[in-house]
Structure formats: C-alpha cells, structure tokens
Image (cartoon, rainbow, N blue to C red):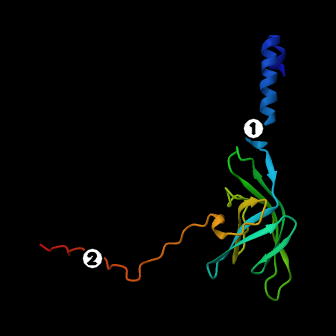
Amino acid sequence: MALIKNCTPRVAAILAAVAALAAAGPAEAVRPTIDRQIAVLQGLDKVTAQTSRMQVEVGQASSFGTLDFVVRACRSTRPDETPENAVFLEISDTPPGQPRHSVFSGWMFSSSPAVSALDHPVFDIWVLRCVDQIIADPEDFGETPRYRLPNDPPVPERPPAARRR
C-alpha cells in the first residue's frame, strides 16, 4: 500500500488494477462446465487383466468386483474448451469376509487419471467421458483396435557369429 500512496494517481490506478487481476487468479481456474447425465468409466481387474466399460447414471450405484460406487456428478467442458471430463465418485470396498469400508471419495479427471486416482490393490477405475445418453454401440467408446499376431510368426534370423582371430 505504501507503494501506491507514493505514486501518481494514474500509476496508482494501474497498480490497483494489476493487483485486482492477480487476485482473481488464472483464467483457466474458472472453466465453464456442462453437467452430464451419464459417466462412462473403465475398470481393470489387476489379477486377471480384464477390463470392463461401464455407463453409470448420475445418482445411481454400480459395482465392479468387490467395489461398490455411486456417481454423484459428471461434468465436461464446453465444446470450444480443452476437452476435460470430471466425475465425483464415492467408492467403497467389501472384501470377502470383511466389513465394507470407504476407499475413495472425490473427483476423477479423464485427462489426468493419476491426479486423483483410486488406490486399490486389485481394482482400478478411471473416467473415460461424460455423456447425456447411453452409448449403445461399443465402437462409439473409441476403443483401441486390437492387433492379432499371425498364426505362424516368422522366426528371426540369427546374426552371423563373430569370427575369432
């Protein structure tokens, strides 16, 4: 404040405007979002290496393995913004013979799954996207094509042995 008092009125006004803008934070901090109705999630069973895609409506409960979860909110950015999907999940685990306990409660992000991830020894769940309608065709999920090995792969040739002198 002492700096502003010792300046000309014009410089003081400029410094006050700059301070107000700095206090507002970066423009990306206030990104407009669109509430969606359905969260598209993917689960991984680390033991069997099987993945499952799930579509869960906001407010509905679902399960994957020993995990039970509820989607509380699903939001995505506007089409003119950098793509981002955020889902608020509450996840609990009920291992066989043990009581249910909470393992995750918070936001998960599609572009940065490691920022806020489920820490579970057997299962992983992450966000793919938020949509307004159930996706009937699995191809619409944008699955990665699977490559198959040929029935009889060629045997690599052995390099010639190095000659001894």
- Which of the 4 quarters of the picture holds residue 55? bottom right
The mark nearer the N terminus, 2 or 1, is: 1
Tell me: residue 129, above or below residue 162. Answer: above
Residue located 68% across and 60% down the image: 113
- In front here: 7 or 37? 37
- Quadrant where the N terminus sits is top right
- Write down the residue under mark 1: 27
- Which of the 4 quarters of the picture holds residue 71? bottom right
- In front here: 95 or 150? 150
Residue type of the residue flagged with mark 1: Ala
Identity of the residue furthest to the left in this view: 165
Residue type of the residue flagged with mark 2: Glu
Identity of the residue furthest to the top in this view: 8
Identity of the residue furthest to the bottom in this view: 97
Tell me: residue 53, above or below residue 33. Answer: below
- Which of the 4 quarters of the picture holds residue 53? bottom right
- In front here: 31 or 150? 150
Residue located 15% across and 73% down the image: 163
- SS at mark 2? loop
Q: Is residue 91 visible?
A: yes
- Write down the residue under mark 2: 157
- Quadrant where the C terminus sits is bottom left
Q: Is residue 106 visible?
A: no
**Counting other residues with Cα less than 10 Å from the Cα at mark 2, is it few (<14), some (14-19), or many (20 or more)?**
few
Q: Position of residue 93 (x, y in %)?
A: 80, 77
Q: Position of residue 62 (x, y in %)?
A: 81, 74
80 on left or right of 145 = right
Tell me: residue 73, above or below residue 65. Answer: above
